[in-house]
Image: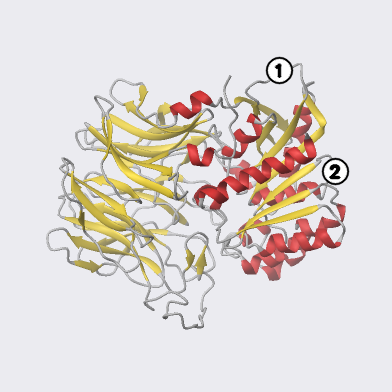
Amino acid sequence: MTEKITPDLVYKLKSVGDPALSPNRSLVAYTLGWVDADSLGSRSRVMLMNTNSGESREFTQGDKDSASKFSPDGHNLAFLRSDDGKPAQVWAMAVGGGEARQLTQLAKGVFDYVWSPDGNNLVICADVDPGGSDPGDSNGIPQVTVVQRVRYRYDTLGWRGDSHFHLFVLDLESLAIRQVTDGDWDDLGPVWSPDGSKIAFMSGRRDDRDFLALSEAYTVSVAGGEPSLVSEGLYSVGAVVWSPDGQQLAVVGSDAPEGMVLWQGWLYILEAGKEPRKLTDDAIRPYLGFPPVTRPASIYWTVSNQIMFLGETNGESFLYQTASEGGKTETLWGGDCLATGLTLDQSVDQAVVTVTAPDSPGDLYQIDLAIGGSIKLSGHNDSYMAEHTAAELEKFWIMRPGFEVECRLYFPPDFDEDKSYPLVLDIHGGPNGAFYDSFVPAQQVLASDGYLVLAVNPRGSSTYGTDFMMAVLGDWGGEDFNDLMAAVDQVLKRPYVDQDRLGVHGYSYGGYMTSWTVGHTNRFKAAVVGAPCINLHSMYGTSDIGISFGEAQWGGSIADAAGKMLERSPITYAANVDTPVLLLHGDADARCPISQSEEYFTALKRLGKEVEFVRFPGCSHQFPRLGHPKLREEYLARTLGWFNRFLV
């Protein structure tokens, strides 16, 4: 008999990421993350695995080491290290061992870096603050802060002020460093040209950059100078790679003015003097990660003129390959998982990917690109999963006007169809996010405690094509709400689902939809609302993306769409709420500011509704994934406790 998966899984599970294959594919470096049992703090180190024997060892000994990358000759391994809470710097060490050498000492640390083709330099992406300090950094003497632009802060990154990410070139022999880019914008995702003479990167330099989430691709000489725009015709760019001859670029981009490349991108070829040439259709969503909180995703252009990248279709991840000249995109590997990291060896015979699946919190898989097939390389969570059975997953589709909607239903490990079970509807964020075939802690904790968990990808979700994704724009709480309720209705036809014990949970846009749901139906007996959008009118001016994101989603500026914003705000329907509501919110959330929960709590409380409000100190919008382990556990425990209180 196995044990339940409980909220303390945050202390038990380990994470793997940042895979990097050595050029000769004999070694793979990766980041192993865990929670220290004594301090309860998050720790990470770089591991080095022999791909032939499968033996793995700790390569670094720091408390916060990550993002390792092999030198082009494979003799050295660079990585990021953060000591004593200080900003991360680049270090390097010989693969055979020895003393680690610190390569950078930048005031605000290093966000990203890339080896030059000859191994003699690094291009560094680092934060630059022209003022030289953050607010309050004046020996304890209070200082005013002056805001002159809309994008003066960014969730998880915090206060930005006039800070920007820019590019530097570091000479590895002298450790001399010089700045290559500058200006009132962020420069990210640097990639060296094959001959080492240029650097391609992404930036948002349009005049309206403060209001729109747009980005472009540029190239700049390694010696510096004025960058050249190379992505004219595209509205946003999310990843860049050079062709082997250095004459072209491949990018993940978008030509949709009302969309964002993070919602749906396409693979394009860029060549001087020519229009961007699209290679993929919207049946595939190339994986991009979540810049600038995470480093850009990797795409590869091989000497045989094949472009290889991770992509997503219908909530599943695949490794794809497409010819640079065009033609059908080929699926090389994947399905039934979420893949978030990719590395190839020099000969393009092997790939390593980071994978999570419904029954696996995270592993490395090696893919044989020459003969096909894959093997699991890591097993850091095997012992935990052997003692804690994951929920079983069933996928099904429902027909809705204009679209089919995919649903995922998670079953308790000891499920018995002759018994009756409570059901929790889980709603994802975005709205252009998606539920994948992956291990989601909240879903696993609920299922392990005896709940059926329904995870729906309603219209607006990504990975189902552009029309499906764009259908939510200007219609929050409209047909997407009807999709969710139709999915619940479909599952309620099953005899083992107790229609009198229904709960609903969501975070971010899922929090919006949860609060919208309880304002429009009383069928749910308990609701957990995480970091919601409650009042779109006030969120427009208080969220870090209120304009750049909100105008595209809500139908225009506050001058154009004020009435509609209030009409589509859950707070407008607070009087209709009869469902007990638990609000969970980080008080340093810049994306969906905590004032949103404060407004809803006050309104519900004044109306005599059953509501409880839990504030998570110092937590950004990303805290359920990136926050302090104790507070991540608390989120899960309070969610489970609320449903146990009203549904059991």
Rendered view: 337 above or below 195: above
* Amino acid bearing label 2: Asn
For the residue pair 443 and 151, the one nearer the viewer reads as 443
Q: Is residue 354 in sight in this rendering? A: yes
Residue 329 in the image: x percent, y percent? 41, 32
Q: Is residue 284 in sight in this rendering? A: no
* Amino acid bearing label 1: Asp
Give the side of residue 25 with respect to residue 239, left or right. Answer: left
Task: State the separation of the CA atoms marked 2 and 1.
Answer: 28 Å
Q: Quadrant of the N terminus?
A: top right
Residue at the farthest top position: 418
Residue 586 in the image: x percent, y percent? 60, 58
Residue 238 in the image: x percent, y percent? 42, 51
Residue drawn 73% across the image and 67% down it = 562
Residue at the farthest front position: 38
Find residue 90 and report its image quarter: bottom left
Residue drawn 62% across the image and 35% down it = 445
Find residue 170 and report its image quarter: bottom left
**Residue carrying label 2:** 522
Rendered view: 35 above or below 566: above
Q: Nearer the viewer, mark 2 or mark 1?
A: 1
Q: Residues within 10 Å of mark 2 (few under 14, many from 20)?
A: few
Residue 336 in the image: x percent, y percent? 51, 27
Give the side of residue 602 with respect to residue 614, left or right. Answer: right
Q: Quadrant of the C terminus?
A: top right
Element on which disc 1 rests: loop
